[in-house]
C-alpha cells in the first residue's frame, strides 16, 4: 500500500499506529462519524421513498382546502386548513432536520478525527470528549425526530417538550466536546515545544484516495456552478412566481372562480416541485463531494485489498453523481428518475458501508 | 504547515464559529418570528379572500412576500457560511495534494476564503437593501469561490496525473 513512505520517520508511524488503536479517540470519531453519515443517509432514503411525496401531497391538499374554503367564504375552515398545513410542515421539517444533522455531525466527527494528533490532551481525555461528541450527535437527531410524535406530553414547560429538551441537550454535548477539542488544538499551537508533528494519514497518495479527492472536489465545483446558474436564472423568477400564484389563487377565491383556483393550485405545486429538485440537487452534489474528499483522507485505514478499495471509491463517486442528476430529472421523467435517484443513494450507502467495515477491520496498523 | 494551508484551516474554523454564532442568534431571535410572519400573513390573505376583501388580501400577500424573501436569505446565509467553512477546512487539510507553486496556492486559498466570507455577506445584505450592490457583492463572492475551486481542482488533477 502507498502508505509507507520512506520520508516518514519511525515516530510518525508509531504515532499513526497508536492514534488508531482500538477505542482511541480517532478511531471512535472515524467509525462513529461514518456510522452517523450512514444512518443519516438511510433515514434520508426512507424519508424520500415513504414520506416526502406523501407529505408534499398533504401540504398541497391543505393549501387546496384553504383556497376552496376561501372560495366558499368559510373562514373557520381556512384557519383549520392552515393549522393542518403547519402540522404537515412540522412533520416534514423534523424529518429533514434529523437527516441533515446526523450527516453534518458525521462530517464534523471526521474532521475532528483528522485533528486528533494535534490536540494536546491525554488520550483518555480525548476519548471522553469523543464519546461525549458521539452521544450528543446521536441524541440531537433522535430528539428532533421525536418532536412531532411526543409534542408537549408530560413536559414541565409550556412551549418546549421532552424531545426538544433532549435534542438541545445533545446539541450542548456536541458543542462542549467540539470546543474542548478545539481548546486542545489551541494548546498544541501555543506550546510548540516539540518538533512539528507529521500525520502519515495526510501523506497518503493511494489510487482510491486520489480518485475520491479529485472526484470530490469536481463534484463540489459542479454543485457551485449549478448553484450560480440557479441563482442567476431561477431564484428571482421562482420568488416572483411564488407570490404571484398565491395572489392569483386568493383573488380567484374572492371572485368565486373555482377553475382559476384549481389552475393556481396546480401551478403552485409545479413551482414547489421545481424549486425542491433544484435545491436538493445543488445541496446533495456538494455534500457528496465533501464526503468523498473526507473519505479520501481515511483510505489508509480501510483494511481491504487495493482493487476493492478502488472499486468502492468508484461506486461512491458513481452514486454521488447519479443521485443529484436524477433528482434534477424527476420533474421531466417522474418516478423513473426518482427510482434511479434512490438507487444512486443506495450505491453511496453500500460503498460507505463497505469502507466502514474495512475501517472496523483495521486495528492500529495501517501499513 | 504552509501559509496557504494555515489560511484555509484557521479561516475555515473561524468562519464555522461565525456561522454557528449567526445560526444561534438567528434561531433564538429571528427564526420563529420570521416563520410566524410568513404563516400568519398567508393565513390572513386567505382569510381576507374568504371575507371578499381584496385590499386586505393584497396587503397580506405583500407582507408574505417580504417575510419569505428575508427568511429564505437568512437561512441561505447560515447554511452557506457553515458549508463553505467545512469546505475550507477539508480543502485545507488536503491542500498538500494540490500540485501548484506555493505562491499560486496562497492566491487560490485567499480567493476561496474571501469568496466564502463575501458571498453569504452579499446575500445577507439583500435583506436590508434590494438594490444591485448587495447582489453584486454576492456575485463577486461566488465568482471568487468558483474560480478558486476550479484552480484547486486543476492542481489536484495535475497531482493525480503525475502520480499515475
Image: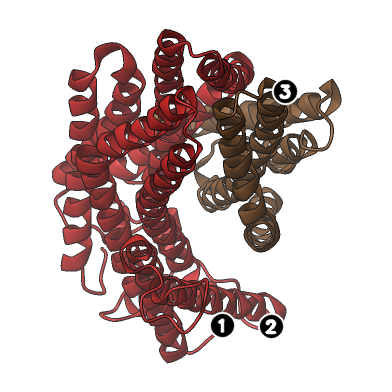
Chain colours: A red, B brown
Q: Is A286 above or below relative to A237?
A: below
Reading the image, the residue beneath label 1 is: A120
Q: Percent position (x, y) of residue B72?
A: 62, 37
Of A249 and B151, nearer the camera is: A249
Compute the Cα span from label 1 to label 3. 65 Å
Nearest to N terminus: mark 2 or mark 1: 1
**Is mark 2 in CB contact (under 8 Å) with mark 3?**
no
Q: Secondary structure at mark 1?
A: loop
Q: Please tell me which residue lies in front, A304 or A197.
A: A304
Q: Are marks 2 and 1 in contact (CB under 8 Å)?
A: yes
Residue shown at 47% from the left, 10% from the top: A257
User: In the depicted view, which residue is nearer to us: B75 or B36?
Assistant: B36
Front: mark 2 or 3: 3
In the picture of the structure, the residue carrying the numbered disc 3 is B55
Discs 1, 3 touching: Cβ within 8 Å: no
Residue B66 location, quadrant: top right
Image quadrant in which the C terminus of chain B is located = top left
Instruction: Decide: is A72 above or below B112.
Output: above
Amino acid at each position: 500500500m502507498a502508505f509507507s513512505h520512506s520520508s516518514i520517520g519511525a515516530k510518525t508511524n508509531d504515532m499513526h499506529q497508536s492514534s488508531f488503536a482500538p477505542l482511541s479517540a480517532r478511531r471512535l470519531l472515524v467509525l462513529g462519524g461514518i456510522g452517523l453519515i450512514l444512518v443519516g443517509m438511510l433515514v434520508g432514503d426512507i424519508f424520500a421513498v415513504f414520506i416526502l411525496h406523501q407529505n408534499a401531497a398533504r401540504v398541497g391538499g391543505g393549501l387546496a382546502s384553504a383556497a376552496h374554503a376561501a372560495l366558499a367564504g368559510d373562514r373557520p375552515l381556512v384557519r383549520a386548513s392552515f393549522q393542518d398545513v403547519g402540522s404537515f410542515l412540522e412533520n416534514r421539517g423534523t424529518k429533514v432536520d434529523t437527516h441533515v444533522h446526523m450527516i453534518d455531525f458525521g462530517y464534523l466527527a471526521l474532521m475532528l478525527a483528522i485533528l486528533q494528533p494535534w490536540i494536546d490532551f491525554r488520550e483518555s481525555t480525548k476519548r471522553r470528549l469523543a464519546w461525549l461528541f458521539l452521544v450528543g450527535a446521536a441524541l440531537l437527531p433522535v430528539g428532533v425526530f421525536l418532536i412531532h410524535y411526543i409534542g408537549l406530553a408530560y413536559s414541565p414547560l409550556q412551549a418546549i417538550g421532552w424531545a426538544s429538551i433532549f435534542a438541545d441537550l445533545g446539541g450542548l454535548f456536541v458543542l462542549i466536546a467540539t470546543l474542548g477539542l478545539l481548546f486542545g488544538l489551541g494548546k498544541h499551537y501555543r506550546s510548540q515545544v516539540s518538533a512539528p508533528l507529521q500525520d502519515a494519514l495526510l501523506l497518503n497518495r493511494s489510487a482510491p484516495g486520489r480518485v475520491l479527492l479529485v472526484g470530490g472536489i469536481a463534484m463540489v465545483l459542479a454543485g457551485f456552478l449549478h448553484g450560480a446558474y440557479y441563482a442567476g436564472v431561477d431564484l428571482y423568477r421562482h420568488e416572483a412566481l411564488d407570490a404571484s400564484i398565491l395572489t392569483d389563487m386568493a383573488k380567484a377565491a374572492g371572485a368565486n372562480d373555482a377553475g382559476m383556483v384549481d389552475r393556481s393550485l396546480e401551478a403552485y405545486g409545479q413551482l414547489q416541485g421545481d424549486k425542491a429538485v433544484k435545491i436538493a440537487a445543488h445541496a446533495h452534489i456538494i455534500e457528496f463531494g465533501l464526503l468523498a474528499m473526507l473519505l479520501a483522507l481515511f483510505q489508509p485505514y480501510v483494511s481491504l485489498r487495493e482493487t476493492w478499495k478502488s472499486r468502492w471509491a468508484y461506486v461512491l463517486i458513481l452514486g454521488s453523481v447519479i443521485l443529484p442528476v436524477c433528482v434534477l430529472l424527476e420533474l421531466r421523467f417522474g418516478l423513473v428518475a426518482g427510482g434511479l435517484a434512490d438507487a444512486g443513494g443506495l450505491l453511496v450507502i453500500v460503498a460507505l458501508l463497505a469502507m466502514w467495515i474495512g475501517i472496523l477491520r483495521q486495528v492500529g496498523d495501517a501499513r | 504547515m504552509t501559509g496557504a494551508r494555515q489560511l484555509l484551516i484557521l479561516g475555515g474554523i473561524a468562519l464555522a464559529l461565525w456561522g454557528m454564532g449567526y445560526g444561534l442568534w438567528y434561531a433564538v431571535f429571528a427564526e420563529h418570528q420570521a416563520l410566524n410572519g410568513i404563516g400568519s400573513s398567508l393565513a390572513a390573505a386567505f382569510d381576507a379572500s374568504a371575507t371578499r376583501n381584496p385590499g386586505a388580501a393584497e396587503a397580506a400577500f405583500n407582507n408574505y412576500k417580504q417575510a419569505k424573501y428575508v427568511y429564505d436569505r437568512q437561512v441561505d446565509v447560515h447554511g452557506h457560511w457553515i458549508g463553505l467553512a467545512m469546505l475550507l477546512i477539508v480543502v485545507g487539510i488536503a491542500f498538500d495534494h494540490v500540485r501548484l507553486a506555493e505562491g499560486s496556492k496562497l492566491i487560490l486559498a485567499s480567493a476561496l476564503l474571501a469568496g466564502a466570507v463575501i458571498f453569504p455577506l452579499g446575500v445577507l445584505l439583500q435583506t436590508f437593501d434590494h438594490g444591485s450592490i448587495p447582489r453584486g457583492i454576492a456575485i463577486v463572492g461566488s465568482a471568487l469561490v468558483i474560480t478558486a475551486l476550479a484552480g484547486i481542482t486543476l492542481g489536484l488533477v495535475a497531482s493525480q496525473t503525475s502520480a499515475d
